Amino acid sequence: MAPDDVSDNEPSPKEATQDQAASVALAESTPSKKPKLSRTRSITSWVLVVVVSILFPLSVMAVWITNTLTNTDHFVTTMAPIATNPVIINNASTRITNELFSSLDVQKRIEKVLPAKAAPVAAPLTSTLHDFVYKQVHRTLSSPYFAKIWNNGNRRVSSTLVAVMSGQSTKTTRALRNGRAVVINITPIATKAISSLDAKGITFFDPLKQVFNSADKYVSITLLTQQQVHQATGIFNLVKKLKWAVPLITLVLAAAAIGISVRRRKTLLRVALGGSIGIVVFLIALRLVRRSAINASVKQDLNPQSTAIIFDTLLRYLKDGLWLVLVILLVIAVITWFVGPARYAVALRHQIARAWNWLVANAKKLSSTEPTSGASPATQRVAGWIDEHRSALRLLGAIVAACYVVFNGSLTFWSALITLVLLAVYLGIIQLVVIWAKRIGGGPGTKPDVDSSSSSSASVGSSQSA
């Protein structure tokens, strides 16, 4: 077709270029709705991630409050180990004994009984009597009777705590708001100790039975001060009203954050990391509260060791729950990052794949029935020695692990678990070396490969000469 034969309906190149430029200008002047929608979804997802990060520790706390503080039986079970704690028993024995001797001037009573010339003996006798009374009180506190008194006291304390933190107005709650502390009365222990002293002929402390049983004077162990209860009231009321709705809301909001997100894998990673950060901050806050409680106990002439033990025992299930959720979130975060397109994640997956292929190849070699050559005579001798003494080596590892578990004074669950893992790894290495020893011909009763190769060469030579 000739150039002059162009149809009138077809635009010229110049006109087409002008039309394209106009279309581009129109497209640029018209705002796109898709980027704006994506930006809105991204901002909303970030807000939900922040909210979920705050709600994760509160969810664990809600479960703990529902299962422990508001459940009397669980509360009694949680606090029961305190009655058998040696530190609590020693401190309570010291306090009761000092209370008995401070309530009565025992040394003057002894001086009245002794002749005038024997008055200097009164002080040593008082000290000896103090030690004897301490042993009697300690024996009473170590008996099941103290555990019974302690559990019954905690059963009453549970209802008191719920009433106070829920804002109920009773005689007990009003007394607590006026400065009284949440305590467990252990006066029956002092009374029983006085009765045991009576059976041994020591009647100095009989008048104290009526004194200790009065409302003005009694022996007790403080669980929570009025200030500590007041600080926890607000969040307790909120969580107590919502109960199981808090963890449910947390999961729903986490799913919503991931669902509306533009990049769901990254949002899942952010939810896991955000929840982990929230739990770590909450654990740090608990540590600060613990330190504040110990300092406050010192100012109020309470034993700081007993305060720390009571605090840790009361909150131990809360801490365990926080650590469990923290581990789960960190595992989710690691897996989410590992399967992503990050450079280090890709490199790590590549290295793991190479290591797996190497293990598979060597496992096939170990399971093969064909002999393996190439090991030096020295290597064969070492492998043969390990194979020959494998039972003794296994027994040695078990003995070392047992000695560590038995004689370690500060053994914990994690140190015991690490010890068992290390023992399993050691036994596994011994087993792999034994298999390897048999593969290279280094087992007991076998000769190095050099002898077998020379003998085979000699046989071949003889056959050729024949």
Image: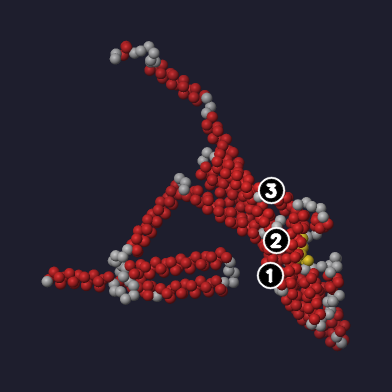
Structural crowding at the residue carrying mark 1, measured as other residues with C-alpha within 10 Å and reported as few (<14), some (14–19) or many (≥20): some
Q: CA distance from mark 3 to mark 1?
A: 35 Å
Res 69 → quadrant: bottom right
Circle 2: element type: helix
Pointers 2 and 1 in contact (C-beta within 8 Å): no
Residue at x-position 76% and y-position 61%: 156
Distance from the alpha carbon under mark 2 to that under mark 3? 21 Å
Q: Which residue is mark 1?
A: 84
Query: Which residue is tagged 3?
Result: 242
Q: Which mark is residue 280?
A: none
Q: Are marks 2 and 3 in contact (CB under 8 Å)?
A: no
**Kind of residue sitting beneath label 1:** Thr
Mark 2 residue type: Asp
Position of the N terminus, as image quadrant, is top left
**Rendered location of residue 166, percent (x, y):** 76, 52
Residue behind mark 2:
73
